[in-house]
């Protein structure tokens, strides 16, 4: 163990009267108060438990190597001692007599007149008082002493925040110094047997030369990312250990399982995947591959992509970030699972798998795909979806995970364990969204930070990274590179239009591997390249007035030979208008049904349309916005699309001729300009869209590498500008450890996109198909809302049970929830930020929620994106 020979703070040598001090009490008085010593010992036991379960020794070794290069062993040893004692000493401030009397109702301290019951900051103060003396007595260079004090204060800052959230480290100096001056007097803490730090000592460090010198030293050592990661992982481990220990006392629940991928699970994963039909076909192809280039099936190329990526991974197992670039329809999911399988087999320390997507539709689609692959084993029970739409996975008492939809009446659910698993991500295989991942990496609260310990020693598969906010690509890839190296994460970045983000990495980094060496071999093969051809449509000099008529005319002609047609607009305004226009003017004997999918349609409505589109003999024309581009598993014959950014064009083309049985076609037109939608994205510029004939050739030849050379060059130039969005501004916040500003900077979704958006609940009756038994049930919004209200106000129900049941209701609520721009003029009641509208059916037209009817006016384009 990394901390095996490290000294632990001997609390009994420095604190008197421990036998009369408490850490927690049961507010319902069902159990005796917990002694302070017992809580501290339990917390450090959980610290060691987490380190064992998650194989964290290598993480601490990585941190030591990156932060303490060429440092004396005496310094290293004290650094380790300070680290582990950050956990051990986190609650030592509960010796505060006011805390004991006011919070613990401890009559032993009723005669003390201490002024405040705070304990976290007092713990920090005791911590720095103890370690400052130890640093002073070390026989090392003055600079090294300052270096250790930097970590001492940083650790103390994390202790001070273990019940709150990380904000700005530099403010801590002022805060601690003020409290030392005004409040932390030795006479107020009669049980503390040690000399405490003077106010002037703290002030001199933070506002003298020492702090400036050390920050420059850290900056010159390229440790800014690593110190940020050090702070985040220490915060995660401390708060997790404390939470587990507190939960054990409060609920009697001892955590013995963190939901990691065990050796047995690895073997099952490998066995089931190898026995999957597609995997066996790939292995058969491996024995008899095409060697003359005369491919007869797209599946032969798909097999080659899987096998080539496997070979290149095995050659580069020591790296951390892998690029998987393959054409649309090339089977990246199977290839990525094969890579995950290889990593789990070859890397003993790796014990968790994350699949991360930008859209919930991709999350749902991947969950179904994984459950199909592993349907013959209990691997499926260990696959968990973490997003706002999926209920908390429940655990039966003394049993394994059970699906929340189970209709057994005799189940006894362990709600406390179920909630604890969700809070900490105690699941082996996790499918989640990129927003959640970024919360784990950059969040500042305890709840956001808990899952970071699960990121350690994991595989993370990132799909469609090009959809992440363009303006922070440079920061994303630099952070990913640092996180992957320190936390021993194997990151697989996959896309059909993969930007070479490593070109934006500032430091010298050989940690990236291209799993497909000759991309042209696949992208330029006719089976992929010619799967969908495209042409440009001219909608006249005034497309706003002429465009609909010209589109309709062309669709009428094409509908004679194409059963399934997809038409995409940038803005919902035009999608809605064209849907009405088609219903009024599409006169044809072809038998096509006309449907629409936008953000105004709930999950049920979308699924009905997608099911219709999947019917082999069905004839359908679907009008949509960009919600259709990624993650929607449809196979259309012909597509029409308003020009936007090149990645979106390729994604759209991926919805056409997916089966590769025919020759698919797409026609690009322009009615709306995409600049409004992609406000801060360099790809919106005219010279990088299909307006430019050079970009048309890039798309035709699938030369996305050449395209992204231009994009990356533009991004790099923007990032070198001296302004709030420049890279130097970001580095300054990182260098200062301003956690709040970093979190805000790394947001994937800007607040202004959703500003003034109101959430409404339209009560009506909706038919819902049960995924397990296929039966159709009627979901009544009125009844659901009453049940939801009842749960919210039920003070008698156990907190854990209520959280689990609310997550189940929230999944159903999503069928009735919509976002609108303006506050509803009439509503029946409000719960939180949700406005309940009883007669929701009157705002439904042709089975869809209609914003125009609801608002009583036509919102402008900016409000109807998607």
Image (cartoon, helix red, strand yellow):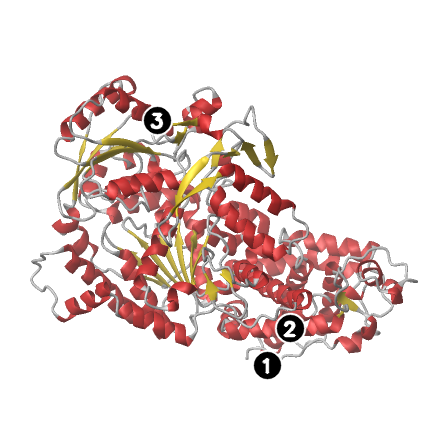
Element at label 1:
loop
Question: In the image, residue 475 lies at what x, y percent?
Answer: 45, 50
Quarter holding residue 320: bottom left
The mark closer to the camera, 2 or 3, is: 3
* Res 514 visible: no
Q: Are marks 3 and 1 in contact (CB under 8 Å)?
A: no
Element at label 2:
helix
Please name whichever residue, 776 or 19, is drawn nearer the observer in this view of the structure: 776
Q: Is residue 731 above or below residue 111?
A: above
* Res 795 visible: yes
Task: Tell me which residue sits at (69%, 54%) in the image.
Answer: 172
Task: Tell me which residue sits at (50%, 40%) in the image.
Answer: 723
Q: Which mark is residue 44?
A: 2
Please name whichever residue, 209 or 345, is drawn nearer the observer in this view of the structure: 345
Q: CA distance from mark 3 to mark 1?
A: 66 Å
Residue lying at the far front of the rendered structure: 409
Element at label 3:
helix
Question: In the image, residue 812 lies at what x, y percent?
Answer: 47, 45
- Identify the mark nearer the N-term, 2 or 3: 2
Quarter holding residue 488: bottom left
Q: Which residue is mark 3?
A: 576
Task: Tell me which residue sits at (13%, 30%) in the image.
Answer: 560
Q: Which residue is mark 1?
A: 4
């Amino acid at each position: 163990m990394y901390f095996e020979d490290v000294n632990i703070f001997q609390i009994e040598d420095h604190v008197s009267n421990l036998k009369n001090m408490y850490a927690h009490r049961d507010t319902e008085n069902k159990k005796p108060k917990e002694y302070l010593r017992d809580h501290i010992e339990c917390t450090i036991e959980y610290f060691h438990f987490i380190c064992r379960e998650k194989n964290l020794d290598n993480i601490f070794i990585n941190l030591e190597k990156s932060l303490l290069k060429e440092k004396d062993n005496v310094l290293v040893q004290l650094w380790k001692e300070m680290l582990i004692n950050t956990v051990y000493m986190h609650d030592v401030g509960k010796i505060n007599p006011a805390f004991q009397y006011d919070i613990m109702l401890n009559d032993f301290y009723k005669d003390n007149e201490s002024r405040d019951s705070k304990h976290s900051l007092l713990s920090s103060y005791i911590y720095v008082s103890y370690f400052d003396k130890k640093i002073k007595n070390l026989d090392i260079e003055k600079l090294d002493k300052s270096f250790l004090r930097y970590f001492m204060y940083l650790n103390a800052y994390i202790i001070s925040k273990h019940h709150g959230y990380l904000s700005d480290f530099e403010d801590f100096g002022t805060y601690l110094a003020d409290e030392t001056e005004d409040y932390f007097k030795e006479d107020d803490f009669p049980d503390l047997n040690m000399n405490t730090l003077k106010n002037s000592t703290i002030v001199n460090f933070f506002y003298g030369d020492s702090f400036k010198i050390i920050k420059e030293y850290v900056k010159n050592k390229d440790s800014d990312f690593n110190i940020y990661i050090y702070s985040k992982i220490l915060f995660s481990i401390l708060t997790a250990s404390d939470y587990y220990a507190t939960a054990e006392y409060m609920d009697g629940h001892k955590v013995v399982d963190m939901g990691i991928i065990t050796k047995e699970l690895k073997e099952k994963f490998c066995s089931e995947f190898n026995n999957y039909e597609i995997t066996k076909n790939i292995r058969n192809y491996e024995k008899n591959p095409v060697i003359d280039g005369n491919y007869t099936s797209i599946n032969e190329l798909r097999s080659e992509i899987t096998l080539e990526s496997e070979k290149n991974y095995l050659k580069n197992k020591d790296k951390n970030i892998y690029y998987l670039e393959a054409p649309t329809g090339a089977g990246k999911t199977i290839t990525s699972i094969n890579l995950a399988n290889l990593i789990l087999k070859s890397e003993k320390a790796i014990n968790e798998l994350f699949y991360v997507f930008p859209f919930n539709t991709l999350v749902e689609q991947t969950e179904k795909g994984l459950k199909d692959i592993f349907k013959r084993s209990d691997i499926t029970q260990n696959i968990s979806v973490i997003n706002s739409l999926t209920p908390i996975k429940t655990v039966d008492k003394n049993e394994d995970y059970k699906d929340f939809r189970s209709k057994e009446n005799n189940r006894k659910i362990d709600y406390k364990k179920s909630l604890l698993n969700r809070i900490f991500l105690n699941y082996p295989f996790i499918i989640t969204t990129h927003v959640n991942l970024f919360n784990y990496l950059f969040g500042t609260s305890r709840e956001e930070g808990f899952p970071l310990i699960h990121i350690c020693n994991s595989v993370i598969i990132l799909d469609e990274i090009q959809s992440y906010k363009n303006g922070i690509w440079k920061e994303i890839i630099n952070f990913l590179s640092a996180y992957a190296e320190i936390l021993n994460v194997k990151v697989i970045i996959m896309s059909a239009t993969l930007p070479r983000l490593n070109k934006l990495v500032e430091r010298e980094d050989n940690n990236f591997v291209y799993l497909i060496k000759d991309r042209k071999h696949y992208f330029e093969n006719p089976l992929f390249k010619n799967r969908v051809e495209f042409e440009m449509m001219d909608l006249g000099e005034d497309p706003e007035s002429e465009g609909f008529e010209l589109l309709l005319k062309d669709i009428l002609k094409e509908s004679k030979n194409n059963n399934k047609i997809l038409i995409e607009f940038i803005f919902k305004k035009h999608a809605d208008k064209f849907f009405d226009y088609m219903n009024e003017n599409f006169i044809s004997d072809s038998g096509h049904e006309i449907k629409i999918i936008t953000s105004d349609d709930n999950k049920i409505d979308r699924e009905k349309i997608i099911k219709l589109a999947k019917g082999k003999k069905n004839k359908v024309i679907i009008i949509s916005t960009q919600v259709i581009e990624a993650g929607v598993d449809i196979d259309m014959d012909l597509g029409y699309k308003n020009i936007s950014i090149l990645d979106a064009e390729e994604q759209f083309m991926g919805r056409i001729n997916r089966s590769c049985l025919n020759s698919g076609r797409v026609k690009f037109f322009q009615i709306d300009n995409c600049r409004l939608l992609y406000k801060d994205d360099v790809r919106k510029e005219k010279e990088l869209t299909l307006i430019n004939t050079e970009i048309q050739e890039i798309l035709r030849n699938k030369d996305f590498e050449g395209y992204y050379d231009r994009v990356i060059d533009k991004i790099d130039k923007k990032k070198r500008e001296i302004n709030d969005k420049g890279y130097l501004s970001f580095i300054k916040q990182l260098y200062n450890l301003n956690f709040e500003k970093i979190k805000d900077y790394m947001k994937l979704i800007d607040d202004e996109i959703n500003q003034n958006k109101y959430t409404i609940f339209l009560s009506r009756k909706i038919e819902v198909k049960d995924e397990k038994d296929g039966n159709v049930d009627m979901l009544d919004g009125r009844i659901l809302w009453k049940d939801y209200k009842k749960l919210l106000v039920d003070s008698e129900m156990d907190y854990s049970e209520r959280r689990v049941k609310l997550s189940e209701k929230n999944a159903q609520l999503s069928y009735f929830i919509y976002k609108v721009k303006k506050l509803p003029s009439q509503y029946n009641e409000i719960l939180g930020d949700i406005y309940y509208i009883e007669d929701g059916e009157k705002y439904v037209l042709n089975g869809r929620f209609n914003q125009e009817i609801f608002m009583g006016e036509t919102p402008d384009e900016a409000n109807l994106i998607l």
